[in-house]
Image (spheres, rainbow, N blue to C red):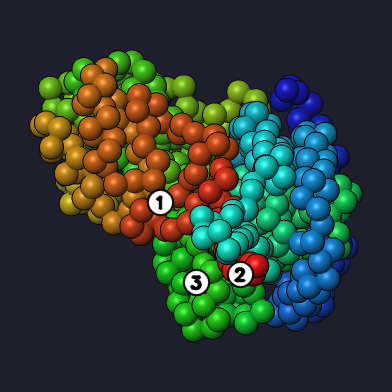
Amino acid sequence: MYSYQEWQQRAAAIKFEGRAFINGQYVDAKSGATRPTYNPATGEKLTEVSSCGIEDADFAIASAREAFESGVWADMAPAARKEVMVKWASLIDAHRDTIALLECLDVGKPISNTYDVDVPAAVRCIRWSGEAIDKVYDEVAPTAHNELALVERLPLGVVAAIVPWNFPLSTTAWKLAPALATGNSVILKPASNTPLTALYIAGLATEAGLPSGVLQVLPGSGASLGKHLGMHMDIDGLTFTGSTPVGQTLMEYSGQSNLKRTFLELGGKSPNIVFADADLDAAASNAATAFLYNSGQTCTAGTRLIVQESIADEFIEKLLAATEGWKCGDTLDPATTMGPMVDKGQYDTVKSYVDIGDSEGCKRLIGGERVLEEMGGWFMPATIFDGVTNDMRIAQEEIFGPVLSIIRFKDEDDAVRIANDSDFGLAGAVWSLNINTALRVARKVRVGTMGVNNYFGGDMTVPFGGFKLSGNGRDKSIHAFDDYTELKTTWIEISG
């Protein structure tokens, strides 16, 4: 890790690639249109990025379809596809400094997070998926002696992937790795305000040997491009990470067009349950991380802290002490633990929920007001409300900022009832040194990922996704391959 001064020097010298990536090359939008992208920590303009329109999307889709139908990638031997994917991962790793810096500047994430977490995670995802390609077998069904039934996994064809602004590099890897590993051609639509790392790694994919047309990256308006991709009759699958309302709209587009396979990782309002018999110091430290990591702009953030009444006051004191290590600051400083909201609009949304919490009669313990205004970014510090009931808006609606609601419970049944009283079901955790209590609660809470005496657990070996309005389908693990493939049966009758 470089020093603060060294990161500043590198940031001053970095060159940005803002052109779209279509058919193996960087190109301007056909209209010549661009839009600026800004550093959320300072408000300063970074560069101009191509603003792709319908013409660009149609050209990219046609290129992707041509590449798929040619078999240049889809029909490549699995071992050969694996080599390309693994080489791509190695190239991303070799460019770790630049990619981490791009993600820091474009998203407003602390450089310590992008360098130590985001880039290594993307490398791991792509390498793991590449290594899995020639280790996933098709099936031979159990049939009569004069019959042979082959069950094959075939790529969907052309897949559109729409990724969010909060973890653009990580979610891009989560989508691209399994989609490409299974032989598809992919149209990637990064968030319009955070496209820089996606554009950068696309060039590295070509350098690794990915054939032209297999991967396209289209920066541009989410509303117009998203609808066009969702309604397009020549796209076979669509994967999206983002808000629940947008996900619902994309599902509608599927029904209105060609019923393209559509799978979604959406919002959350995750419960973090602490029992009286938990390791309170560990639970408090993790509870702070659970709602403050990435400044709370995390779909799995543990923003409902459900604490047993008998230890609530004691636990809150430990939690407040744990939040003291989370400070907003210059994102190029390796010591910074919290960056800004991604833009003024997101800050205004978070601030509006702080006002709602005040109006609902909650007790605001800390935070809730903008800090470091002189830097030019929209920084919101750790904000904690006590005295919250689960029917309040700040307990039911996703805020997507560093705002925590503390809800007290009586017993195990009460904790489970509160945890499940939500439209969402993405993640959660339970803290108890009684393994029976912990496992009972973990099984009863309706979420896709549940931690037991940990938060944010999991790696590439396990699937990630949600229940209810948190979406469908799964990212990560071998299960992600299911979303990007069709099952085909070939039934053979043997004579003689």
- Asked if residue 466 is positioned above or below residue 8 in the image, the reply reads below
Q: Quadrant of the C terminus?
A: bottom right
Which residue shows up at 67% across the image and 42% down it? 135
Residue 286: image location, x then y, percent: 40, 25
Q: Which mark is residue 466?
A: 1
Mark positioned earlier in the residue sequence (2 or 3): 3
- Asked if residue 50 is positioned above or below residue 195 in the image, the reply reads below
In the rendered structure, which amino acid carries the disc numbered 1? Answer: Gly
- Asked if residue 102 is positioned above or below residue 239 in the image, the reply reads above
Residue 385: image location, x then y, percent: 26, 38
Q: Nearer the viewer, residue 491 or 247?
A: 491
Q: Nearer the viewer, residue 4 or 30?
A: 30
Going by the image, does 267 lie left or right of 375?
left
Q: Quadrant of the N terminus?
A: top right
Q: Which mark is residue 403?
A: none
- Which residue does the numbered mark 3 point to in the structure image? 250
Q: Nearer the viewer, residue 393 or 36?
A: 393
- Secondary structure state at the residue bearing disc 2: strand
Going by the image, does 24 lie left or right of 60?
right
Mark positioned earlier in the residue sequence (1 or 2): 1
User: What is the distance, in whole Å, between disc 1 and disc 2 at their CAs?
Assistant: 42 Å
In the rendered structure, which amino acid carries the disc numbered 3? Answer: Leu
User: What is the distance, in whole Å, between disc 1 and disc 3 at their CAs?
Assistant: 17 Å
Which residue shows up at 46% across the image and 22% down it? 325
Q: Nearer the viewer, residue 206 or 47?
A: 206
- Asked if residue 181 is positioned above or below residue 462 in the image, the reply reads below
Q: Which mark is residue 493?
A: 2
Residue 105: image location, x then y, percent: 69, 43
Q: Are marks 1 and 3 in contact (CB under 8 Å)?
A: no
